[in-house]
Image: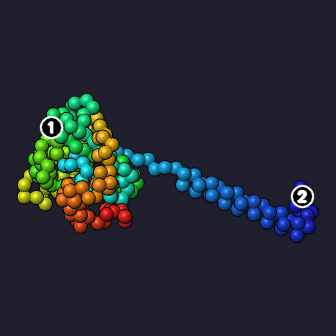
Amino acid sequence: ENKSLMPKKQRISKSNNLEFMNKSLWMLFLVVGMAYGQTQKPTLKKAYFAGGCFWCVEAVFESLKGVEEAVSGYAGGNYKNPTYELVVQGRTGHAEAVEVIYNPQVISFKTLVTAFFESHDPTTLNQQGPDRGTQYRSIAFYSNAQERKDIETVMAQQAGKYRKPIVTEIQPMTLFYAAEGYHQDFEKKNPNNPYIRAVSIPRFEAFKAKRPDLLKKDSH
C-alpha cells in the first residue's frame, strides 16, 4: 500500500487506530498481569520454637505481622506419636512447641527468632513461669545452616540483656507432631480460663509492651 497516495486524513486515522490498539493491548496485559499477581499466593515457610506452655507461645506468634498460623504441638523428642498425657509427664523427651507458618516477604526468620527470645525467659532451665519440667524447656529449631546462624546471632545479641546465661537449646528440626485439637487456639477460645488469665495473657501483654512494632493491628 502506497501511503503517499492516501489522503492525509485517512493516513492520520489509520495511525490513530494503530496507536489506540497498541494502548489497548498494553492495558489488557497490565490488567491480566495484576490479576495474576493478586491470585498468586505467597510462598509460606515454617519455623519451630519451644518456650514453655504452647498456649502462651502460640498466642504470641499468631499476633505477629506476617504470621499466617501457629500450631501447638510437640518437638525435640524421640517418642513416636506423643500425646499430651505422655508429654506433660516428661516421658517422651518432647517439649511443648509451636509450628509457625509465616510469609517471609513480610517477616523474616531472624525477626521470628528475636520475637521468640523477647517473649519468654531463656535463662530458666526446664521452666517457664509456673511450669516446670523438660517439656517446658527453651528450644530454637533450625531447618538449614542459615537458620542456625540466625539463631546464634540473635542469641548472642540477647545474651547481654540477662544477668544469667541463656540456656536455650539449638536443635535441628526433625519431626513436629501437632497437638490434640482442643489445644489449638486455646487462649483465643478460652479467655477466662484461670491459667490463661494468670499466666498467658500477662505474658503476651509484657511482649506487647516490649515490641508493639511487630504486632498485627487486631492483636489483643
Q: Is residue 35 left or right of residue 194?
A: right
Q: Which residue sits at x=58%, y=57%?
A: 34
Task: Tell me residue 201's x, y (percent).
Answer: 23, 60
Residue 202: % across, % down: 20, 62
Q: Answer with mark 2 or mark 1, whichever residue precedes in sequence.
A: 2
Q: In which quadrant will I find the N terminus?
A: bottom right
Query: Vertically, is 48 above or below 4?
Result: above
In the rendered image, is residue 135 in sight?
A: yes
| Count of numbered marks | 2
SS type, badge 1: loop
Is residue 59 visible in the rendered image? The answer is no
Separation of marks 2 and 1 at Cα, in angstroms: 91 Å
Q: Which residue is under mark 2?
A: 2
Res 80 quadrant in image = top left
Q: Quadrant of the C terminus?
A: bottom left
Q: Which mark is residue 72?
A: none
**Residue under the image location 19 percent in, 49 percent down:** 52
Kindly identify the residue that appears in the image at 40 percent across and 54 percent down. Answer: 105
What x and y, as percent, mark residue 136? 16, 45
Residue drawn at x 22%, y 59% is 197
What residue is pinned by disc 1?
A: 90
- The x, y position of residue 114, in whole percent, is 24, 56
Quadrant in the rendering for residue 178 = top left
Is the C-beta separation of discs 2 and 1 under 8 Å?
no
Question: Which amino acid type corresponds to the residue marked 2 in the rendered image?
Answer: Asn
- Check the image and report above or below for 137 versus 210: above
Q: Amino acid at mark 1?
A: Gly
* Closer to the camera in the image, 198 or 82: 198
Report helix, strand or loop for mark 2. Answer: loop
